Amino acid sequence: MAVEKGGPAAAPRRRTVPVLAGLGLALLLGMILSLLVGRYAITPREAGLLLWERLFQVPSGPESSAARVFFNLRLPRIFAACIVGGGLALSGCAYQGVFQNPMVSPDILGATAGAGFGAALALLLSLDSALVQLMSFLFGLGAVAVTMGIGTAIGARYNKTLSLVLTGMVVAALFQAGISLTKYAADPYSKLPAITFWLLGSLSSVTSDHLPVLGIPFLVGAMPLLALRWRVNLLSLSDEEALSMGVNVTALRGTVILCATLITSSAVAVAGIIGWVGLIIPHMARMLLGPDYKALLPGSALMGALYLLLVDDVARGSMAMEIPIGIITAVIGAPVFLFLIYRGSRS
């Protein structure tokens, strides 16, 4: 059967645009709502005045407490939640396309475990926050590089995709052991709580200085993924069939993995380990948009941004003490995933 350039078309084209537009509008409304959520109350009128004064440089005297909270804490955190959530969902969707397995998540090649070990080691060595992010980012990329190197060497004799997945599991397990070792060696009264809290995932320490660390790798990784999104559909074919259509599957698979890993590592470097987003959100986006990656990749990014934005609102607004985001995503993600498995078994 001939495969069109656009890939599978389970979701009609006329439905795709309204769904993506609706997700974009929902994300915009979620961002506006999130500006008003928090322990420091800011009314819609105050938020509008603050934005007006900042955008049009209206003199308003000394900076108020509301302005400091709004621009230095709340606004950067909202942008960070959107980038992290969108990035994790986008990379999870890309990984699922590469490996043609809906059970795959961004940590399948060891990126999350490697980034977590890098941050834990930096915290153990009492390095500053910039070096914590740098080590987390580099170790995340390094873990995937090790996985790709070993997996490719093994895959020369066996199935390439299976070799990468199995090697990724081994590399992730080694880095998880490294995380456990750093926690064991850490001071139980100072460094151990810092490592533990960071590994739970949180956006509580995000400032405007973190946005370039998140935004630049996200753009560098997301733009190629979105530009090549129709080609991801071809990964469902055999290498010979895809090659006959003019697609270098090896190069495509490597590009997608590199871009997804770049996004994942930068997200983990700033926000810690936030699980389930890259696994659950692509499934939910697939229910709305179908399996065509032309729509599924941008849809997953928009839905992931909205999801983590709302989760962060719950984390910082539901209790007097902020709840780590990783706990909430696990509480939501586990039963949702079981429901999706049950739904799939019934269909």
Image (cartoon, grey):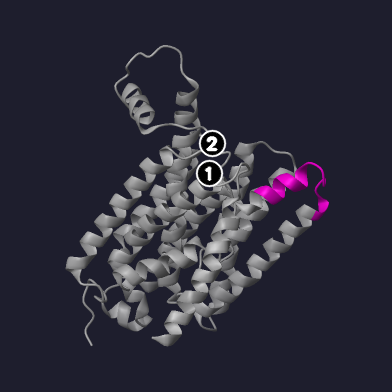
- Residue shown at 51% from the left, 32% from the top: 40
Foreground: 23 or 292? 23
Q: Residues within 10 Å of mark 1 (few under 14, many from 20)?
A: some
- Residue shown at 47% from the left, 67% from the top: 280
Image quadrant where one finds the C terminus: bottom left
Measure the alpha-carbon separation of dots 2 and 1. 6 Å
Q: Residues within 10 Å of mark 2 (few under 14, many from 20)?
A: few
- Mostly what secondary structure, the magenta segment? helix
Disc 2 and disc 1 in contact, CB within 8 angstroms: yes
Residue furthest to the top: 61
Answer with left or right where residue 132 lies relative to residue 103: right
Foreground: 344 or 38? 38
Dot 2 or dot 1, earlier in sequence: 2
Amino acid at the residue labelled 1: Gly
User: Range of the magenta residues?
Assistant: 184-197
- Mark 2 secondary-structure assignment: loop
Amino acid at the residue labelled 2: Arg
Query: What numbered label is drawn on residue 9?
Result: none
Query: What numbered label is drawn on residue 39?
Result: 2
Answer with left or right where residue 66 lies relative to residue 168: left
